[in-house]
């Protein structure tokens, strides 16, 4: 698929997906979501790509929300279909099996905040702002914001953000656990790539299974989550990477993981 609303680049095993509608503050519409779904599948199936970074074009916005022109004409049926479709795309990002990092360079509002939350990790520039302002438009978050936000920051803080519709600063987002790091704007992409490389230096299957244990374990009882963890731990023990990792440790040398 040729992209009109995204830029897709690969370098050093990292794919970078840039939302490229700066005149619209990178707002999400159906075309953006279709192209995003294609780019996610492209990352999933490309053996050379070990991690993906998502960011926004321009200096103002990561993604400032939904395209209001498209949103304003939604019927009840189309609205539900839009929500379900968007949830499916972001579920695909969350379950990618490779680490995804949102480099939030400006406004991350509505669907932009929801998309960032579907990523494995989030880094923000000092000028970034986060929020779920949907109630100000007479709607609620529709791309799983009502589900992922309380899981990240707790029920009370999530309800405050969703019900007030007011944005918060990057510093506040860090304080409540919505983002992992806040860095100067000029350092955002370098810091994001450095974190991606740090993760990529580890065993790919172990990284994948660890993400799966955390993501799916949150939806289980603790006992069920522990069973999942033990099962995935056992799978790791069957990999070549486990043998290489333990051997490299004993031989006091860097491990060379193959993802097998």
Image (cartoon, rainbow, N blue to C red):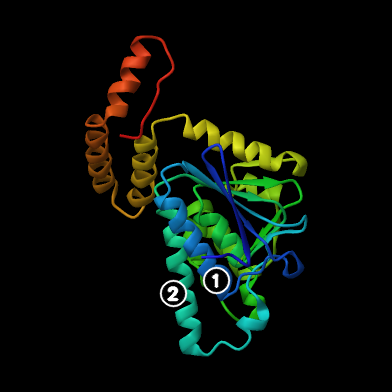
On screen, residue 249 above or below 181? above
Q: Which mark is residue 86?
A: none
Left or right: 63 as drawn, with respect to 35: right
Mark 1 touching mark 2, by CB under 8 A? no
Query: Mark 1 or 2, which is nearer the eye?
Result: 2
The image position of residue 47, as x and y in percent, is 41, 44
Give the class, few, some or many, for how many residues have Cα within 10 Å of label 1's Cα (few <14, many ≥20): some
Q: Which residue is mark 1?
A: 141
Q: Which residue is mark 2?
A: 84
| Between discs 1 and 2, the one toward the N terminus | 2
Give the class, few, some or many, for how many residues have Cα within 10 Å of label 2's Cα (few <14, many ≥20): some
Q: Tell me what residue is drawn at x 64 percent, y 68 percent.
A: 65
On screen, residue 237 above or below 187? above
Which quadrant of the figure contains the C terminus?
top left
The image position of residue 80, as x and y in percent, is 46, 81
As drawn, the residue found furthest toward the front would be: 2
The image position of residue 249, as x and y in percent, is 37, 14
- Choose between 136 and 51: the one closer to the eye: 51
The image position of residue 240, as x and y in percent, is 27, 28
Q: Tell me what residue is drawn at x 43 percent, y 45 percent.
A: 98
Left or right: 212 as drawn, with respect to 224: right
Q: Considering the numbered disc 2 on the image, is that residue within a helix, a strand or a loop?
A: helix
Q: Tell me what residue is drawn at x 22 percent, y 43 percent.
A: 227
Q: CA distance from mark 1 to mark 2?
A: 12 Å
Q: Considering the numbered disc 1 on the image, is that residue within a helix, a strand or a loop?
A: loop
Q: Tell me what residue is drawn at x 39 percent, y 38 percent.
A: 207
- Choose between 251 and 114: the one closer to the eye: 251
Left or right: 212 as drawn, with respect to 234: right
- Choose between 205 and 114: the one closer to the eye: 205
On screen, residue 85 above or below 108? below
Whether residue 98 is visible to the viewer of this picture, yes or no, is yes
- Choose between 60 and 216: the one closer to the eye: 60
């Amino acid at each position: 698929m040729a992209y009109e609303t995204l830029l897709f680049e690969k370098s050093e095993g990292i794919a970078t997906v840039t939302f490229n509608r700066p005149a619209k503050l990178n707002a999400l519409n159906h075309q953006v979501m279709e192209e995003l779904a294609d780019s996610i599948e492209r990352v999933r199936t490309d053996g050379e790509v070990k991690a993906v970074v998502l960011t926004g074009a321009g200096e103002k916005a990561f993604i400032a929300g939904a395209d209001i022109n498209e949103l304003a004409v939604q019927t009840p049926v189309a609205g539900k279909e839009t929500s379900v479709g968007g949830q499916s795309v972001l579920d695909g990002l969350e379950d990618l099996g490779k680490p995804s990092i949102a480099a939030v360079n400006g406004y991350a509002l509505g669907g932009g905040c929801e998309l960032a939350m579907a990523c494995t990790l989030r880094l923000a520039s000092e000028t970034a702002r986060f929020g779920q302002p949907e109630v100000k438009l007479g709607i609620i978050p529709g791309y799983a914001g009502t589900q992922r936000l309380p899981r990240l920051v707790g029920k009370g803080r999530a309800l405050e953000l969703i019900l007030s519709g007011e944005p918060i600063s990057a510093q506040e987002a860090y304080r409540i656990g919505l983002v992992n790091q806040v860095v100067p704007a000029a350092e955002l992409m370098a810091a994001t790539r450095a974190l991606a490389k740090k993760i990529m230096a580890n065993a790919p299957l172990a990284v994948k299974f660890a993400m799966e244990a955390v993501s799916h374990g949150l939806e289980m009882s603790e006992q069920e989550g522990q069973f999942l963890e033990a099962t995935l731990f056992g799978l790791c023990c069957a990999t070549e990477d486990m043998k290489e990792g333990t051997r490299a440790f004993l031989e006091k040398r860097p491990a060379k993981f193959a993802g097998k």
